[in-house]
Image: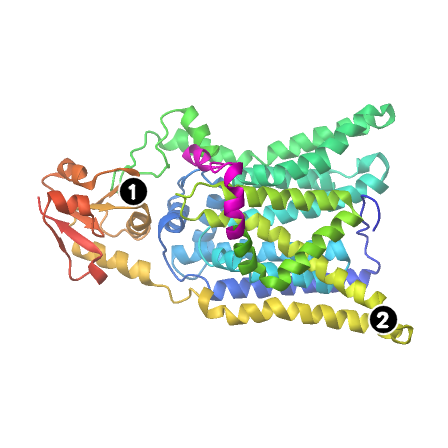
Amino acid sequence: MTGSTINMAPARQGLLSRAARMSLGVFVSALLLYVFTGAPSVLSGDQAEHQFTAWIVGVPHATGYPLFTMLNALAARILPFGDVARRVTVMTAVYSALAITAAFWVGRALTRSTLAGLITAATLAVAPEFWRLATIAEVYTLQVFFILATFLAVLRWWEVEAHEPHLGRARRGLRHPLALACLLAGLGATHHGSFTPVAGPALISTVALPLLWRLRDPEQRGDAVRMLGRCVGWFALGFTPWLYLAAQYILFRPFDYYHGTWEGYHLYWGNPQGWGDVLNLALGAGFRLKVFTHGWGRLPQLLPVYLGELREQVWWVGMALGALGAVGLWRRSWRMGLWTTLVWLGGSFFGLNVAADVPKAHVYYLPAWVIWAVWTGVGSWMLAQWLLARLPATMSGRSMLIGSGLLAMILLLPLARGVRRFEQFDRSHDWGYRRNGEAMLSVVEPDAVVLCRWEDCMTLRYLQFVEGRKLGVQLDQTEPEAGVNWAERVPIYAPLPVYAVRYNAQLAERYPVEPIERVPAELLWRVRQ
């Protein structure tokens, strides 16, 4: 591999077939891991919201996640096992397994080594953050798939750009890798708002700008214009899931977030009152104000925390091999080095600068960990090549066996860490949220009002909207931490019975409150007006 191109043509058809069989094994193995360690039923907060929104086919919190919701809505109706919540979690396992399979192909494409691809896949598969997100109903592993799949298409585009006449314009539709890359990028940007700041700079600098540069040459201008047109068209097609948000607004307005019964209720987060609100939701709504809030001055203070997180994901060996792989990619291809570095920097800075009051800000590091896993696979292969080059001449005939043995030993490291951490990430027995929610709804009156935070309210909404449990119970979802005084909410519902999920000091100062003994650990409190 030299210059800025990469030869991805297989040396032998048999090798490709073997790699295809290996990738199927990677997918099945990852899927089984995440399905068997996945949560068995309803969760809380964002995860519970995704679980019940899939069933009622609504719109969850910003950015609406239309593609994720539509795919989960389909799965909730066709999968023949588990409750609705479990089916959505299984779909997350499918997205995660696809992401791991894409990681295998990226690692193999960069090294022409199946073992290096396996190291890339294994490093990401058992990284704590990825594994944790793969076992719950969350959106982030599908974002990883779009990042890696886009990179695979971009790698193929660079090969076509360098070797095929007229930039491969004879290829039609998604057979052209640039069209595929643009469609995947559009879907990625639609799926999660962070895709644009994380992957956008890499795509602009290594794909868009070199293509625009060809416009300077009259002989290449026509082909470049055609490719740009295709790219814009396919990229725009990737935004079509946003039509789901428009359709929901047209069909179900007006919205009332605090309406607690099923009849006449349809969840559309934020209760949009106009098309401006719909667009604001799609673009991130209030979350945009929480991004890039720390500023450059705090980066030295935050950097040790970041490095500690990186060590937790890939261990010391992975940190060293990843650094080696990053340097090696830059030396061999400026485009591959720049693409991976910009995505890594984008994921790192995005995670570093999300406001401290976002309790799950650590998940935004995930694209950075993905790139480090890719670098780890490349670094492992480079280390093997370096050692083989220094073998005595008498052992040159055994170089293939020795190199494969070294890579196999490196592969065992993440696998061993995964075995050691299995119990830590096994959520297959996590029935707590369902049991608590069922217990709370079983003791409150049919016309009661429950004051609850987001995390607890979403579990109760799932039990109501999916399973039809006490639909007359109203859920007042407000956050005391955001300045809402629960004591001021109580008079709104007089003379209905009012309960609070978890103890609230402001409420107790104004009203007598007593715990409900039939609910675990003083979880539910009766408010005496």
Residue 241 rendering spot, x and y as whole percentages:
52, 37
Residue wearing tag 1: 481
Name which residue lies at 17% across and 56% down. Answer: 443
In the picture, the disc for residue 69 is: none
Task: Inspect the magenta stretch and tell me whether residue 462 lies in it.
Answer: no
Q: The C terminus lies in which quarter of the figure?
A: top left
Q: Is residue 170 in view?
A: no
Residue 218 place in picture, x, y as percent: 86, 23
Compared with residue 376, is residue 367 higher up or lower down, i.e. above or below? above
Seen in the image, is 248 located left or right of residue 400? Answer: left
Q: Residues within 10 Å of mark 1 (few under 14, many from 20)?
A: few
Looking at the rendering, which quadrant does residue 402 occupy?
Answer: bottom right
Question: x and y percent of residue 127 in the render?
Answer: 55, 60
Amino acid type assigned to the residue bearing label 2 in the image? Leu
Magenta highlight: main SS:
helix
Q: For the point 83% across and 41% down, which residue is it?
A: 162
The residue labelled by disc 2 is 391
Q: Amino acid at mark 1?
A: Glu
How many numbered badges does the structure rendering display? 2
- Asked whether disc 2 touches disc 1, contact meaning CB atoms under 8 Å apart, the reply is no
**Callout 1: SS:** helix
Please give the range of residues in magenta: 285-305
| Residue drawn at (65%, 34%) of the image | 234
How many C-alpha atoms fall within 10 Å of the one at disc 2: few (<14), some, or many (≥20)? few
